[in-house]
Image (cartoon, coloured by chain):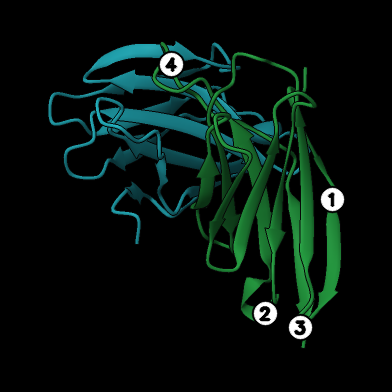
Chain colours: A green, B cyan
Amino acid sequence: QQQVKQSPQSLIVQKGGISIINCAYENTAFDYFPWYQQFPGKGPALLIAIRPDVSEKKEGRFTISFNKSAKQFSLHIMDSQPGDSATYFCAASKSRAAGNKLTFGGGTRVLVKP
Amino acid sequence: DSGVTQTPKHLITATGQRVTLRCSPRSGDLSVYWYQQSLDQGLQFLIQYYNGEERAKGNILERFSAQQFPDLHSELNLSSLELGDSALYFCASSDISGDTDTQYFGPGTRLTVL
């Protein structure tokens, strides 16, 4: 059962453009929603995270938008740079509950063309 | 560098064999998680330990087992290996007693079963 669905699977954006990745979740008990960035041959690294008590969080060029009623959240990468070319994963967990395992989306491979 | 270390980086073995993957969490982190990343299944949670005790279990096969030692390092044991076990295995750690749910991932162990 895929509890977190991520789209698109891949996207190509020009340098300076906006990359948008969407995720939808099913389990309303989730209350922590991180985004991870993964480069080839490396482990996932936390990019930005949000809790459902806020609708938006911005850190530099990265913004999470959260829609609790729709059970959806998205990552916006503004002014995309070639160095942003990586695979991005959304995830969800029940924070600090017994076993706050991360449930990941399927990933989005982003290619930023110079 | 996340502060989480994993050894070995690469492992090549044959079907039917047994291997042990090792993880050292970030200093001070009591919780260790194991994840499997494969092309067809994505990133999947296997198991979590907290201060030496099993905390949560995911879709971990019966052929797989893990433990966390008093010095907090963890080992994932994979036995009776099959071709389908070829994947990247990540360890992550977190300090779930604090205010953050951030999980920090290690660089992974790439397992190839021939």
Of labels 2 and 3, earlier in sequence is 3
Q: Amino acid at mark 1?
A: Gln
**Local SS, label 3:** loop
Badge 4 is on which residue?
A99
Q: Chain of mark 2?
A: A
Which mark is in front, 1 or 3?
A: 3
Residue that protrudes farthest toward the left in the picture: B71
Relative image position of residue A97 (x, y in whole percent): 42, 13
B103 and A59: which one is in front? A59
Of labels 1 and 2, earlier in sequence is 1
Relative image position of residue A60 (x, y in whole percent): 53, 67
- Alpha-carbon distance for marks 2 and 4? 36 Å
Image quadrant in which you'd find residue A109: bottom right
The dot on residue A15 is: 3
The dot on residue A84 is: none
- Alpha-carbon distance for marks 3 and 4? 40 Å
Q: Is residue B72 above or below residue B37?
A: above
- Label 4–label 1 contact, CB within 8 A: no
**Local SS, label 1:** loop
Q: Chain of mark 1?
A: A
Q: Residues within 10 Å of mark 4 (few under 14, many from 20)?
A: many
- Tell me, yes or no, whether dots 3 and 4 are on the same chain: yes
Quarter of the image that includes the C terminus of chain A? bottom right
- Tell me, yes or no, whether dots 1 and 3 are on the same chain: yes
- Label 2–label 4 contact, CB within 8 A: no
The dot on residue A9 is: 1
**Local SS, label 2:** loop
Residue B86 visible within the image: no
Relative image position of residue B74 (x, y in whole percent): 29, 31
Badge 2 is on which residue?
A81
Of labels 3 and 4, earlier in sequence is 3
